Image (spheres, rainbow, N blue to C red):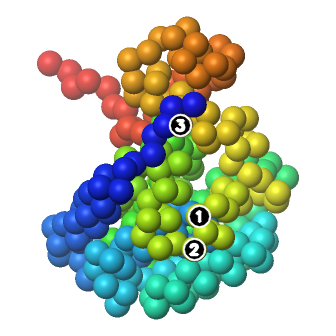
Amino acid sequence: MIDLRFSEAELEQQRDHITTFIRDQVDAAGADGVVLGLSGGIDSTLTGYLAVEALGAEHVHGLVLPAHVSSEDHMSDAEWVAQELEITFDVLEIEPLVDSLLSAYPEAEGDHVAVGNARARLRAVLNYLVANHENRLVLGTGNRSEAAVGYFTKYGDGAVDCHPIANLYKGQVRQLARHVGVPEELAAKTATAELWADQTDEDELGISYETLDSILAAHIDGPLSVAATCRLLEIDEDAVERVRGMYEGSDHKRNAPPAPEPLE
């Protein structure tokens, strides 16, 4: 695999770059701070740490948004992060909102993808409800690896005002998290979006994050062909083609909705 780890100097540069970005975004919007959904996972945890460093704890409001598929451990970790950061946070149950959607459209019940995406979109609605009420921005927690393959819900966890860690591959997220003092228990935690029971990111993606990061760096973001990537990483062509397919198939998620060209 490709070694994508930062040096100590680069870690400090990333830390300063991201915290400056957060401050600049808040200042430019004339906002009073940020709202951040905390899942207990490494992406939202790192974003929370950097937001507090950038703005101060009083300007960061955390939301813990459990559903019935959310494990108690994850929700406990989310609250632990909020307490460690000494930020104001609220725990808002989203399952009653999911139930309301399904009562309006019961045909979707049992469709774990449709209902899972609805959960992500309901979380976005609550993020913005609080953010609008408090004149704050909604911070995204998406990383470079997941954005590249479309591993996020359109108008769900992708519906935010800015993406502070969007330039970091998943492995780099874990490295920077350790650097800024995130406890190892959280930095090494198995990634899951918890959109349905027992879901994990790597199982759903069908590839490890280490392999995904390397393929993205070599082939999608880098100059290497499929064949050259396979030789460099010593992996099957199917894995590279799979990532290429996910990247191309999710282009619509990374861009504004299309419109026809204006008539002359």
The residues bearing labels 3 and 1 have C-alpha atoms spaced at a distance of: 17 Å
Counting residues from the start of the chain, the first of labels 3 and 2 encountered is 2
Give the quarter of the image for residue 54.
bottom left
Residue type indicated by callout 1: Ala
Give the quarter of the image for residue 52.
bottom left
Question: 177 or 126: nearer the eye?
Answer: 177
Counting residues from the start of the chain, the first of labels 3 and 1 encountered is 1
Residue type indicated by callout 3: Asp
Tell me if residue 245 comes above or below residue 217 in the rendering. above
In the picture provided, is 33 more to the left or to the right than 43? left
* Mark 1 nearby-residue class (10 Å; few <14, some 14–19, many ≥20): many
Q: Which part of the image, by quadrant, shows the C terminus?
A: top left
Mark 3, residue position? 213
Mark 1, residue position? 187
Whether pointer 3 and pointer 1 mark residues with C-beta atoms closer than 8 Å, the reply is: no
Question: 233 or 19: nearer the eye?
Answer: 233
Mark 2, residue position? 183
Question: 113 or 45: nearer the eye?
Answer: 45
In the picture provided, is 159 more to the left or to the right than 70? left
Whether pointer 2 and pointer 1 mark residues with C-beta atoms closer than 8 Å, the reply is: yes
Task: Residue 64: give its label.
Answer: none
In the picture provided, is 218 more to the left or to the right than 134? right
